[in-house]
Amino acid sequence: MTHHTRAAACNRDCRCLTTNRAALHGALETGLSPQTADLVAARPLLFADSAVFVSAAEVARMGAVIAAVERVAALPGYRDTMLSLAPPSAQRDPGPLGAFLSYDFHLTGDGPRLIEVNTNAGGALLGAAVARAQAMCCQGPMASPGLAGLEATLFAMFRSEWQRQRGDAALRRVAIVDDRPETQFLYPEFLLFRDLFTQQGVEAVIVDGAALDYHGGVLRAEGQAIDLVYNRLCDFPLTEPNHAALAQAYADGAVVVTPHPHAHALRADKRALILLTDDALLADWDVAAADRATLAAGIPRTVAVTADQAEALWAARSRLFFKPTSGYGSKAAYRGDKLTRRVWGEILAGSYVAQGLAPPSERHQEAGRPMKVDLRVFVYNGAIQFLSARLYQGQTTNFQTPGGGLAAVFVVDDDAMPQKDAIC
């Protein structure tokens, strides 16, 4: 179990504050966008003070859950069911798999639990920056999976996304698109991605989704034709009026968009968790018994919030977490034991799922209350790319906790580091 591992002991007893902020800012200043360091300095709660430790066994179990989900998500029954819930814009499969798929886990006392899947997850390059700025602590050197060569891995992902729709055509210009991007908390990462594309010989611009123009079969930003959109919008189906140009260009196949509405509908709609935890349905789809067991152990049971189940769900609310089906960033998500009748009414009037509560693990620091830990696993084409974590206090993840924020993740091999080893 997680709380008996060496990693759990490190998270509990190692009080080292390992983030070297001077080194972090110095590394950012050496990039093509020197203002990135200034923007990070203006966001003191972006990066956590401490790293997070996970065991090799936990990583293996998360990998098994991810592999089982990927196999189920490829089944016709699963795809047909999810697409039947999706908007028209999500029905067409344009070819790309979708960049920055993330599987988010809580490390519970009984092992990792998948709490949700996201298709436009942020934090990969910022997570790499903080992982490279860790001072040595008494635990000594440890592995941060995927950190070496991560930028090359991520660019290869974008190249693959492009080739899945455009083949051998030249990728010339990328637009990194969000609403009012310069106001976004993770805007420094947009700059890092612009640098990454530029270093690989691909022109890149950061642009507001409302500023895109589409005519003559060409999507343009600042008057320049765009080949690929790295989509950071939270308008997942691309239905908001100010995204009409992008939506039409996507529908016409005039631009490669990643991640796109089809990918979101298949993976990140929270109703997917209902299918993945319905053992009878999985059996009907002939899902292997081993995969069904992995999913049952690795994902908290999730059900739809419906009027006919309202009384039972309210009675069981202390053991549940409620999430909007198309939610993101923990917005409008609630722990059941914190619910008021007013909020419960809003949940019943909306589109929600109820998920079995999987309390997060904790990372202790020098003083104050322990930090809660959310672990983010970046995945592409079924393979794990990188691990990052978010430390926070409160009901849900946030960037409002002193000492919290994006955290480096180090893997501890329990076989190589016996329990008797000293912990600081």
Image (cartoon, rainbow, N blue to C red):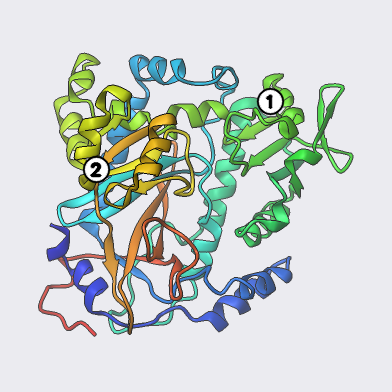
Q: Residue furthest front?
A: 341
Residue 233, image quadrant:
top right
> Neighbour class for label 1 at 10 Å: few (<14), some, many (≥20)?
many
Kind of residue sitting beneath label 2: Arg
Residue appearing at x 37%, y 66% in the figure: 393
What is the number of callouts on the image?
2
- Answer above or below: position of 267 versus 1: above
Question: Depth check: 309 or 295 in front?
Answer: 309
Location of residue 238 in the rendering, given as x and y in whole percent from the top left corner: 64, 30
> Neighbour class for label 2 at 10 Å: few (<14), some, many (≥20)?
many
Location of mark 2 (residue) = 317
Q: Is residue 52 visible?
A: yes
Q: Earlier in the sequence, mark 2 or mark 1?
A: 1
Q: Is residue 30 visible?
A: no
Q: What is the distance, in whole Å, between disc 2 and disc 1 at their CAs? A: 41 Å
Location of residue 267 in the rendering, given as x and y in whole percent from the top left corner: 43, 32
Q: Nearer the viewer, mark 2 or mark 1?
A: 2
The reply, left or right, for residue 197 in relation to residue 2 is right
Residue 164, image quadrant:
top right
Residue appearing at x 15%, y 31% in the figure: 290
Q: Quadrant of the N terminus?
A: bottom left
Question: Depth check: 135 or 362 in front?
Answer: 362
Question: Depth check: 36 or 410 in front?
Answer: 36
Location of residue 364 in the rendering, given as x and y in whole percent from the top left corner: 29, 75
Residue appearing at x 38%, y 31% in the figure: 348
